[in-house]
Image (spheres, rainbow, N blue to C red):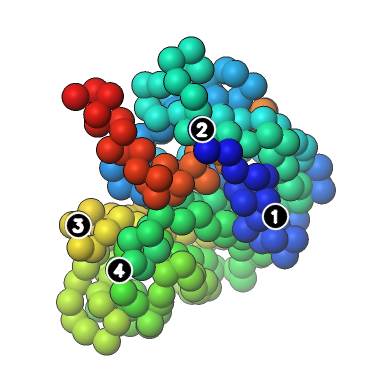
Amino acid sequence: MRRITTAALVAGATVTALAAPAAADDHESAVSILHGVPGLTVDVYVDGEELLPDFEPGTLTDPMMLAAGTYDIAVYADGDTPDSAEPAISAEGLEVPGGANLTLAAHLAEDGTPMLSAFANDVSETAAGDARLTVRHAAAAPAVDVRAGGEPVITGLTNPNEQVLDLPAGMVSADVVLAGTEDVVLGPADLDLGEGVNTIVYAWGSAEDGTLDLAVQTIDGLHSAPEGVPSGQGGLMDSSMLMVLAAAGAAGVLAAGGLVARRATQRG
């Protein structure tokens, strides 16, 4: 069994939350999760109960409200249970911060090493007629340029960084090229940038393995003072959000620890 500390799992999220736009109050946070590690599926248990079975790569959860507090979690290889195996990862007293709007991303670093990043989502107001575009590099790939309508709008973006643009609302055809070249690695993709909406685009996967892909998240209600927490697709939150935080940290550690090979042996 591999045991990780609360600090190791959510340090990035906690630090980011301190600078993030406020959520409804300091007692809860809006949290989404992207599983961007190719080839891994996990099951997540909270207090001994399975809350997230078969969490697959490419999945981006709906945002939900999470009450600040501490919880115990355990993560198993897909198909393992508390009765059949020790957890691959466990964390007791997992601390969940409050007062933030976050997306946690389990993804690959540029060199292919699994990692966990916590992003503070920009929920500040946009000007009338404007949309917000956030691009996040979460792929095992070198620096890239992002083009809209064939023209570079973001240049030299590296993993695990982001760039945020406010621009007129409307339909945009975007693609991703290797920095300084015309070599398209993702897209083109048509993005409907709505007024008062933060459209967040993630590049994830591995260029070397041919698994590059895009994931898109939206947060609306930014064109005027929001009532409550801008949450994109919405969603109610209870303690099940713990599974999200656990799975985000788990995905990278599972890959790094060779759990894929162990799972294949068990099922072979």
Upstream in sequence: badge 2 or badge 1? 2
The amino acid beneath tag 2 is Met
Q: Give the CA separation, mark 4 to mark 2.
A: 32 Å
Upstream in sequence: badge 3 or badge 1? 1
Say which of 19 and 130 sits in front: 19
Badge 2 local density, few (<14 within 10 Å), some, or many (20+)?
few
Point 45% across, 29% down: residue: 76
**Residue 111 visible from this viewpoint:** yes
Residue 225, position in %: x, y?
72, 57
**Residue 234 visible from this viewpoint:** no
Upstream in sequence: badge 1 or badge 4? 1
- Which element carries disc 2, helix, strand or loop? loop
Query: Is 134 situated left or right of 101 in this image?
Result: left
Q: Give the CA separation, mark 2 to mark 1.
A: 25 Å
For label 1, the residue is: 14
Q: Residue furthest top?
A: 83
- Which element carries disc 1, helix, strand or loop? helix
Q: Residue furthest bottom?
A: 180
Say which of 51 and 200 sits in front: 51
Point 29% across, 82% down: residue: 179
Residue 89, position in %: x, y?
52, 36
Q: Give the CA separation, mark 1 to mark 4.
A: 27 Å
- Could you tell me which quadrant the C terminus lies in? top left
Q: Which mark is residue 1?
A: 2
For label 4, the residue is: 141
Q: Which mark is residue 209?
A: 3
